[in-house]
Image (cartoon, rainbow, N blue to C red):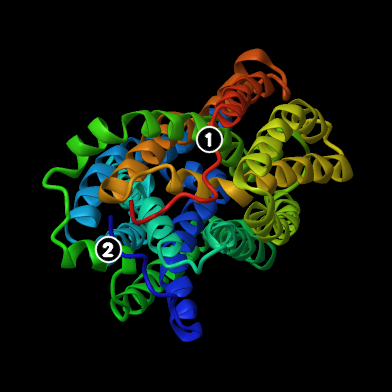
C-alpha cells in the first residue's frame, strides 16, 4: 500500500486540469469536426451518384479509425503504467497532432484518385490510435491529482473538457458554413478546422511537458512497485473490472457518438442546412456542458452509483422519443430531441469517468481503463454513426435506429445497477 499523496496547491490544480483537459478536448474536437464535415468530406473523397452512399463511405472511414483504439490502449497503457502517465500523455498528443495535420493536407479524390481516401484512412487510424490512450491517460492523470472528496467533480471536469472540444469543433464548423459559400467549403473550407486542431495539439504538448507525474505514480516509482507487463497483469487482476467497465461504456458510447453524428444525420431527415443542424447541436451542447459539473459534484455528496444509475435509466427512456422528435423535420422538435439526448448524457457523464477510473487498481489503472474504454468504444462507438445511417436507409425510417440505442442503454443500466459504490475507493491500492 502506498502513502496517500499530498494535496496539490491551487496553482498546481489549475495546471493539472489544463494538462489533462487539453488532449481530451482535442480528441473530441477532431471527432466533432469530422462528424460535422462528413457531407463535405464525402463529396471530396468519395464522389458517387447517390449522396447517401458517399456519406456512408465517409462515416465508415470515421469508424475505421476506432479499430486502432485497442492498439493504442495497449501501447499507451503499457507506457502509462510502466514509465509514467505524463510520458504516455505527451506521446498521445504528438500522434494526435501529426494525424490531424495529415488530414488537413490530404489530397482529394479529384486531385490524387485513390491516394486521397488512403491518406484520409491513415490519418483517421492515427487519430484512433492516439485516442486509445488519451481518455484513460487524461482520466487517470486528473483523478489521481484530485483533492480528497472532489474526485467526482474532477472526473466531471474531464468529461466537460470532452464536451468543450465537441462544442468548439461544432462552433467552428457552424461559423465556417455560415460565412463561406458552398463552393468554398467544398474546395478548402473543410480543411480549416483540422489545421486549427493540429496547431492546438502542439500547443497542448508544451503544456503537458511542464508538469510532473501524478502523486500516485511518483509514489509507485519511488517504491519500484510497477508492473512488468501491464496488459497481462490487467487481465489477471482487473479482468472483471475491465468487463464491467465495458458494460458501463456500451450504451453510453452509442448514445454519445450517435449524438455527435446527429450533426450530419439531421440533414438527411429534414430540410435544414448543415449550418443550421450544427448550430442546433451546439446549443444543446451548451446545456449539456453546464449540467455535467453539477452531477459530478452531486456524486461527491450522494455517491457515484445513484447518479450513474439515474443517467443510464434516462438513456433508456429518452432514446426513442429523441429519434422521433429529430425525425419530425421541425426545427423546434429537432432541438427538443437533441436536448433530451444532451440531458441524459450529462447526468451519466457526471459520475462515469470517476467510477470507471476508481474501479481499476493502481498498478494497471491506465492499461485496464484504456482497454475497457478503448475496446468498447472501438466496437460500439465508432460504428454508431454508420449503423444509424445504414438503419435509416435500410428500413426507410428516421426512427428505426432508436432500437439499437435502447438495447445498448439497457445493457449499461443493468451494469450500473450491479456496480459497487466507488466513492470511498483508495486510488493508491
Q: Quadrant of the N terminus?
A: bottom left
- Decide if residue 95 is in sight here: yes
Q: Nearer the viewer, residue 421 or 397?
A: 421
Query: Dot 1, how many residues are within 10 Å of its Cα: few (below 14), some (14-19), or many (20+)?
Result: few
Residue 420 tag number:
1
Helix, strand or loop under label 2: helix
Q: Quadrant of residue 338?
A: top right
Looking at the image, which residue is at 61% across and 28% down?
417
Judge left or right: residue 213 versus residue 422: left
Judge left or right: residue 189 versus residue 93: right
Q: Nearer the viewer, mark 1 or mark 2?
A: 1
Residue 310 tag number:
none
Residue 68 screen position, x and y as percent: 29, 40
In the rendered image of this protein, does residue 25 appear above or below residue 43? Answer: below
Looking at the image, which residue is at 34% across and 56% down?
428
Residue 346 screen position, x and y as percent: 68, 49
* Residue with the most extreme top position: 395
Q: Quadrant of residue 121?
A: top left
Residue holding disc 2: 217
Query: Dot 2, how many residues are within 10 Å of its Cα: few (below 14), some (14-19), or many (20+)?
Result: many
Q: Disc 1 vs disc 2: Cβ atoms closer than 8 Å?
A: no
Measure the alpha-carbon separation of dots 1 and 2: 25 Å
Helix, strand or loop under label 1: loop
Looking at the image, which residue is at 47% across and 43% down?
356
Q: Nearer the viewer, residue 270 or 298?
A: 298
Judge left or right: residue 60 versus residue 388: left
- Decide if residue 112 is in sight here: no
Residue 274 screen position, x and y as percent: 68, 49
Residue 91 screen position, x and y as percent: 25, 62
Looking at the image, which residue is at 32% across and 73% down?
205
Amino acid at each position: 500500500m502506498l502513502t496517500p499523496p499530498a494535496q496539490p496547491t491551487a496553482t498546481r490544480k489549475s495546471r493539472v486540469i489544463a494538462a489533462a483537459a487539453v488532449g481530451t478536448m482535442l480528441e473530441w474536437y477532431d471527432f466533432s469536426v469530422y462528424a460535422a464535415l462528413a457531407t463535405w468530406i464525402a463529396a471530396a473523397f468519395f464522389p458517387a451518384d447517390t449522396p447517401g452512399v458517399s456519406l456512408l463511405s465517409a462515416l465508415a472511414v470515421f469508424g475505421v479509425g476506432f479499430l486502432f483504439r485497442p492498439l493504442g490502449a495497449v501501447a499507451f497503457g503499457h507506457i502509462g503504467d510502466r514509465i509514467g502517465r505524463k510520458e504516455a500523455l505527451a506521446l498521445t498528443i504528438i500522434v494526435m497532432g501529426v494525424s490531424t495535420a495529415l488530414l488537413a493536407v490530404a489530397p482529394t479524390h479529384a486531385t490524387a484518385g485513390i491516394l486521397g481516401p488512403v491518406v484520409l484512412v491513415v490519418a483517421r487510424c492515427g487519430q484512433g490510435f492516439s485516442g486509445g490512450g488519451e481518455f484513460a491517460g487524461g482520466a487517470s492523470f486528473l483523478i489521481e491529482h484530485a483533492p480528497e472528496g472532489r474526485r467526482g467533480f474532477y472526473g466531471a471536469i474531464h468529461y466537460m473538457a470532452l464536451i468543450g472540444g465537441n462544442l468548439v469543433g461544432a462552433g467552428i464548423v457552424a461559423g465556417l458554413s455560415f460565412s463561406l459559400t458552398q463552393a468554398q467549403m467544398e474546395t478548402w473550407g473543410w480543411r480549416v478546422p483540422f489545421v486549427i486542431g493540429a496547431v492546438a495539439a502542439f500547443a497542448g504538448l508544451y503544456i503537458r511537458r511542464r508538469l510532473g507525474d501524478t502523486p500516485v505514480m511518483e509514489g509507485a516509482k519511488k517504491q519500484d512497485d510497477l508492473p512488468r507487463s501491464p496488459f497481462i497483469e490487467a487481465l489477471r487482476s482487473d479482468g472483471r473490472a475491465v468487463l464491467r467497465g465495458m458494460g458501463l461504456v456500451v450504451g453510453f458510447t452509442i448514445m454519445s457518438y450517435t449524438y455527435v453524428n446527429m450533426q450530419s444525420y439531421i440533414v438527411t431527415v429534414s430540410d435544414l442546412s448543415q449550418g443550421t443542424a450544427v448550430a442546433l447541436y451546439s446549443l444543446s451542447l451548451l446545456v449539456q456542458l453546464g449540467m455535467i459539473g453539477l452531477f459530478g459534484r452531486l456524486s461527491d455528496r450522494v455517491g457515484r452509483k445513484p447518479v450513474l444509475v439515474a443517467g443510464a435509466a434516462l438513456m433508456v427512456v429518452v432514446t426513442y422519443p429523441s429519434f422521433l422528435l429529430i425525425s419530425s423535420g421541425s426545427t423546434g422538435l429537432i432541438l427538443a430531441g437533441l436536448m433530451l439526448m444532451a440531458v441524459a448524457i450529462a447526468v451519466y457523464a457526471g459520475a462515469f469517468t470517476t467510477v470507471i477510473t476508481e474501479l481499476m487498481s493502481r498498478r494497471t489503472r491506465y492499461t485496464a481503463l484504456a482497454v475497457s474504454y478503448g475496446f468498447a468504444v472501438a466496437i460500439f462507438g465508432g460504428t454508431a454513426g454508420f449503423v444509424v445511417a445504414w438503419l435509416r436507409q435500410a428500413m426507410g425510417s428516421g426512427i428505426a435506429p432508436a432500437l439499437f440505442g435502447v438495447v445498448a442503454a439497457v445493457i449499461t443500466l443493468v451494469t450500473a445497477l450491479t456496480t459497487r459504490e466507488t466513492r470511498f475507493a483508495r486510488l493508491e491500492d
